[in-house]
């Protein structure tokens, strides 16, 4: 590692830090970085997906705070410590208090949340832990809480992206431990 | 995991039915329509892409990643990636994803009998050493990724997999952690009505 990752700066594609490399604590010229670099299209699109969902040009109806909260929740449930640390820091940088972080991380046992946030985190938990149990009725609950079809697509993509990232990180961790 | 009964898995071509209106129904922008035309591989799956096109930048990047992970040159054989995709989809209970990727696995390996047994009996069905190593790794990564240890790579190493091949199989299983979470929570696979098989 060349330095401490700073999750509050943009992980931009224009030479900025790559999110998966940062989570894994690897640099592009390390052995695992070079393994990833054998598939430049995968590296680019994984980062592109991260930017599209966590740093969108047009966030539409899902705020940056909500996006970070969802990503933190998936990481806490999986669990994936580096991914949770990353989104916790980004939420702090958005001005989120320790009490509000606790409400996300300890959901539903923590401090009470607004109905919309509650509906979003319930759906996050369902998709993270038991996607096979999801039904059309769950989407109706999100719509009743004020989410549009586009918002529902966005939060589903985001939960799915983080579910992807945490598993790729496990593969990188195992290969690193074996070396 | 699910309280539902084990779904009926099939290699038949299914249609994906959305639970929300797609951009085809709500009025696509020209960019959304062009993207759906570009990325939807079949009429049966078009509603899936037309729903995801509500968030076009996310769909575009997801599609680039999917194609790189599943069809990129070098590394793990395509059949091995499809097996990881099918095993992940079986564990998550995604009937549509399983139908597509079991079918592709059977086509690539020309082993319809083993593929059908995998669907009928599940991931515990008898497999060769190479296939067993892929399926067991994909199942663990699906169910409880944080619990994996370096010992879980031993069967893959004994079957001769390289770092690159293990990473490719990891990415394929992870890609279906992603795909299943969309396919089985935004709609469902249903039989094609009125289509002659």
Image (cartoon, rainbow, N blue to C red):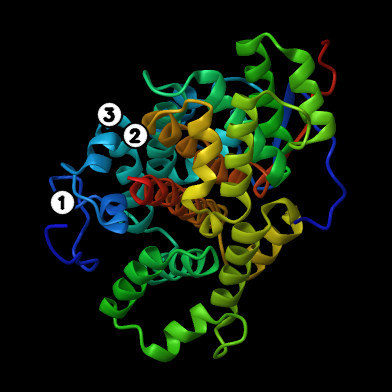
* Picture quarter with the N terminus of chain A: bottom left
Disc 3 target residue: A38
Residue B140: percent from left, percent from top: 61, 48
Disc 1 target residue: A16
Which residue shows up at 27% across the image and 42% down it?
A: A32
Residue B191 visible, this angle: no
Disc 2 target residue: A42
Residue at the extreme right of the image, as rendered: B5
In the image, is A126 to the left or to the right of B69? right
Labels 1 and 2: the sequence-earlier one: 1
Residue B27: percent from left, percent from top: 53, 38
Same-chain status of marks 3 and 1: yes
* Picture quarter with the C terminus of chain A: top left
Q: CA distance from mark 3 to mark 2?
A: 9 Å
On what subunit does the disc labeled 3 rest?
Answer: A
On what subunit does the disc labeled 2 rest?
Answer: A
Residue A82 visible, this angle: yes
* CA neighbours of label 2 inside 10 A, class few (<14), some (14 to 19), many (20+): many
In the image, is A52 to the left or to the right of A75? left
Viewer-side residue, B137 vs A92? B137
Labels 3 and 1: the sequence-earlier one: 1
Which residue shows up at 59% across the image and 59% down it?
A: A128
Q: Tags 1 and 2 in contact by the CB under 8 Å rule?
A: no
Residue at the extreme front of the image, as rendered: B158
Q: CA distance from mark 3 to mark 1?
A: 19 Å
């Amino acid at each position: 590692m060349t330095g401490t990752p700073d999750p509050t700066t943009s992980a931009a594609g224009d030479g900025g830090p790559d999110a998966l490399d940062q989570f894994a604590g690897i640099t592009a010229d390390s052995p695992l970085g070079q393994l990833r670099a054998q598939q430049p299209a995968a590296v680019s699109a994984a980062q592109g997906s991260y930017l599209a969902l966590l740093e969108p040009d047009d966030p539409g109806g899902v705020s940056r705070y909500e996006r970070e909260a969802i990503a933190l929740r998936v990481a806490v449930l999986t669990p994936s410590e580096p991914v949770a640390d990353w989104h916790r820091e980004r939420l702090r940088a958005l001005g989120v208090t320790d009490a509000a972080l606790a409400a996300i991380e300890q959901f539903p046992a923590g401090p009470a949340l607004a109905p919309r946030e509650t509906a979003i985190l319930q759906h996050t938990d369902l998709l993270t832990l038991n996607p096979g149990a999801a039904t059309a009725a769950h989407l109706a609950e999100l719509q009743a809480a004020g989410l549009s079809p586009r918002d529902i697509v966005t939060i589903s993509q985001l939960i799915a992206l983080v579910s992807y990232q945490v598993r790729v990180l496990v593969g990188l961790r195992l290969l690193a431990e074996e070396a | 995991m699910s309280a539902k009964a084990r779904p009926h898995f099939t290699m038949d071509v299914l249609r994906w039915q959305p639970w929300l209106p797609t951009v085809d129904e709500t009025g696509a922008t020209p960019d959304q329509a062009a993207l759906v035309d570009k990325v939807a591989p079949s009429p049966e799956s078009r509603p899936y892409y037309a729903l995801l096109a509500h968030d076009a930048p996310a769909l575009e990047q997801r599609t680039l990643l999917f194609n790189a992970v599943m069809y990129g040159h070098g590394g793990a054989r395509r059949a091995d990636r499809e097996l990881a995709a099918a095993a992940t989809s079986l564990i998550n209970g995604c009937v549509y994803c399983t139908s597509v990727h079991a079918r592709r696995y059977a086509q690539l390996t020309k082993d319809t009998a083993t593929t059908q047994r995998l669907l009928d009996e599940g991931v515990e069905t008898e497999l060769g050493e190479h296939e067993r190593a892929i399926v067991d790794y994909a199942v663990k990564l699906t169910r409880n990724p944080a619990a994996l240890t370096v010992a879980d790579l031993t069967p893959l190493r004994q079957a001769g997999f390289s770092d690159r091949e293990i990473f490719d199989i990891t990415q394929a299983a992870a890609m279906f952690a992603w795909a299943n979470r969309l396919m089985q929570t935004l709609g469902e696979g249903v039989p094609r009505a009125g289509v002659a098989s």
